[in-house]
Amino acid sequence: MSDSPNKFIRAFSMLLEAYDYAADTQSTLWDFAVPIRSLKECGLDWSDFRWLARKGFVRHAQEVTLLGDDGRDFRATGDLTFTRRTCFVLTESGVLAAAGACNKQRNADSVNVFSKNLVAKSRRPFAEDDGQAAGPSLTTPQPHIIQWDTNSRQLHMNGKLVKRFKWPAANQEALLNAFQEEHWPQRIDDPLPPQTDQDPKRRLADTIKCLNRKQINRLLQFHGDGTGEGVIWEVIEPA
C-alpha cells in the first residue's frame, strides 16, 4: 500500500488512530469506531468503502446509539450496505495495511494479541470470525416491517397503511425518506436542509408533530431524541 492515494493515507491514519485509542484505553474497537462522514471528508467514496470491505481491511456496522445510552451500540447491515450512520473499525490485516500506508511500524504478533485481548475485555461481547477483528455486539433488528413508498407517498407497517399524503409535505417526506434510506434505524439525525430564516430545532419539532397527526392506523409514534437534532420512532402498542 506504499503507493496508496493520499485519500487512503488520510483515511487509514484516522482509522489507525482510533485503533490506538482503543488499545491505550483498553476499550473495544467499536467504542472508537470512525463514522462514514469522517472518512468521506478524507476523500473516500462508495467504491472505496466496498474495496476496503472486500479486502478485509475494515468491519462496518450502523450505529443505533440513543441519547443516554451507556457506550455505543450498532446494528448489522449487509456486507456492502452503507448508510449515513455506518461506522468503521480496522481488522487485524487492516491495521497492518494502514501502518504500511502511513509508514508506521506494527508487529503482526502484537496486533493479533491486542485483538484477542479486546475480545476478552469487551464490555459488549464480540463475535469471532476467522481470526479477524471481531464485530460488535449488534442490537436485535426490529421485528416490524416498515415501508415508506416515495411514489405513492404511503407509509405502511406490517402491511397496514399508517399514513397517506394526498399533497406534498416536503419536511415530513424528508424524514421518512431518511428513515427508509437507512433501513429504519431507531434514530436518525435531522435530515432537513438548513434554512436561514428558520430555527432548525423548532422546525424539526413541528415536522415530528405533523408526522404524528392524521394517521389512518395509529401504529407509529415519532419523537425528538432530546437534543433537537435527531428523530426516533416507536410502535404504538394496542391498549
Image (cartoon, rainbow, N blue to C red):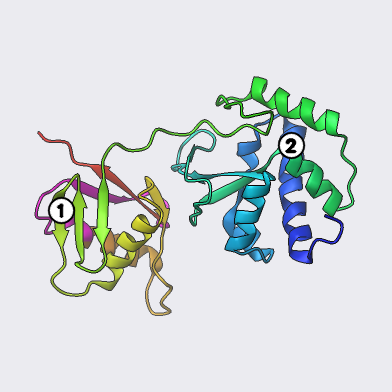
Q: Is residue 67 or residue 46 the one in the foreground?
A: 46
Residue located at (62% from left, 31% from top): 134
Rendered view: 173 above or below 101: below
SS at circle 2 = helix
Q: Which mark is drawn over residue 65?
A: none
Residue located at (30% from left, 60% from top): 176
What is the quadrant of residue 60 in the picture? Answer: top right
Q: Is residue 14 left or right of residue 161?
A: right
Give, as a three-letter code, the residue at label 1.
Val
Q: Is residue 29 left or right of residue 97?
A: left
SS at circle 1 = strand
Residue located at (65% from left, 24% from top): 119
Earlier in the chain: of badge 1 and badge 2, it is: 2
Residue located at (41% from left, 60% from top): 190
Q: Is residue 213 magenta?
A: yes
Give, as a three-letter code, the residue at label 2.
Glu
Which range is magenta?
A: 211-229
Q: Quadrant of the N terminus?
A: bottom right
The single residue placed furthest to the top in the displayed view is 120
What is the quadrant of residue 43 in the picture? Answer: bottom right
Determine which residue is flagged by label 2: 92
Q: Is residue 5 or residue 201 the one in the foreground?
A: 5
Cα gap from disc 1 to disc 2, whole angstroms: 46 Å
Q: Is residue 106 or residue 170 the one in the foreground?
A: 106
Q: Is residue 223 magenta?
A: yes
Percent coordinates x, y for residue 54 in the rendering: 63, 49
Discs 1/2, front = 2
Determine which residue is flagged by label 1: 162
Percent coordinates x, y for residue 188 in the rendering: 41, 53
Percent coordinates x, y for residue 154 in the rendering: 19, 61
Rendered view: 57 above or below 193: above
